[in-house]
Image: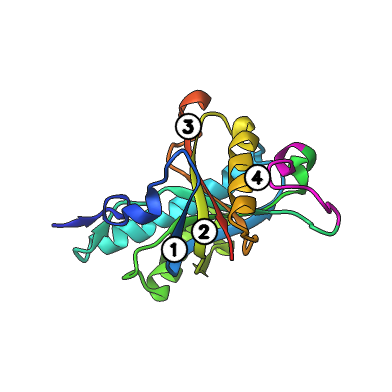
Amino acid sequence: MNKLDLIKTDKNYYTAKTNPEIVYIEKTNYISLTGKGDPSGIEFAEKIQALYTTAYAIKFMLKAINNDFVVPKLEALWSFDTEKYKNISMDEAPLKIPRAEWDYRIMIRMPDFVTKKQIHKSIDIAVNKKQNELARTIELFELEEGKVIQVLHIGPFDNEPATLKKIQEFSIENNLQQNGLHHEIYLSDFRKTAPDKLKTILREPVK
């Protein structure tokens, strides 16, 4: 039985260089949860757990009908109140805006063949069989980013401002403007990987 692995079949999406570059990202489907606050807190960790519980329920449901897939990497969109925090550059934002003030949408990508019905059924399994109440708030989310600047960040999240500065400078040099939310793809499991070995794709939609 074949098992779809999006990381291998969609290298455009999951591969980035250590210097900024422009790529084009097509419409993509995810299961997701939204929230606000410190990503090192308990609530964030519990939401990740709810998302993975549901993702694996979907996987095993599809596996039973010979349509298996590898559960993809965790991702997140990050944003803040731009009226409250005006005139803060991309690379300054992580340093000047408290973690408690960040809004997030955590996401796990879904193969195109996964249906809404299968997702809703898997959410019911996560809630009723796995006793994960947070799964009730999971939703199907569609995102079409189009043109983006992206770069591979290697190392701790605390060092991201230096990598974001590269994106900022690249954007200015090429006369590009922000056109969406800051997007991170966690190629490493930050719950298990040493900070200096973390690999994260940083992506900024532009026009």
Identify the residue at image location x=50%, y=64%: 147
* Magenta part of the chain: 84-95
Specify the quadrant that holds the N terminus: bottom left
Q: Which disc is residue 25 wearing?
A: 1
Of 2 and 174, nearer the camera is 174
Secondary structure of the magenta portion, mostly?
A: loop
Residue 154 x, y percent position in the rendering = 49, 32
The kind of residue tagged 3 is Leu
Spatial separation of the CA atoms under disc 2 and disc 3? 22 Å
Residue 206 x, y percent position in the rendering = 58, 61
Q: Is 55 displayed left or right of 38 in the figure?
A: left
Q: Which quadrant would residue 188 be assigned to in this image? A: top left
Secondary element type, mark 1: strand
Residue 38 x, y percent position in the rendering = 70, 41
Spatial separation of the CA atoms under disc 3 and disc 4? 22 Å
Secondary element type, mark 4: helix
The kind of residue tagged 2 is Val
The residue that disc 4 covers is: 43
Spatial separation of the CA atoms under disc 1 and disc 3? 23 Å
Nearer the observer, disc 2 or disc 4? 2
Marks 3 and 4, the one that precedes in the sequence: 4
Spatial separation of the CA atoms under disc 2 and disc 4? 30 Å
Q: Do the residues bearing badges 2 and 1 touch, measured as CB atoms within 8 Å?
A: yes
Indicate whether 98 appears above or below 194.
below
Identify the residue at image location x=27%, y=53%: 5
Secondary element type, mark 2: strand
Q: Is residue 91 magenta?
A: yes
Of 152 and 157, nearer the camera is 152
The residue that disc 2 covers is: 148
Spatial separation of the CA atoms under disc 2 and disc 1? 7 Å
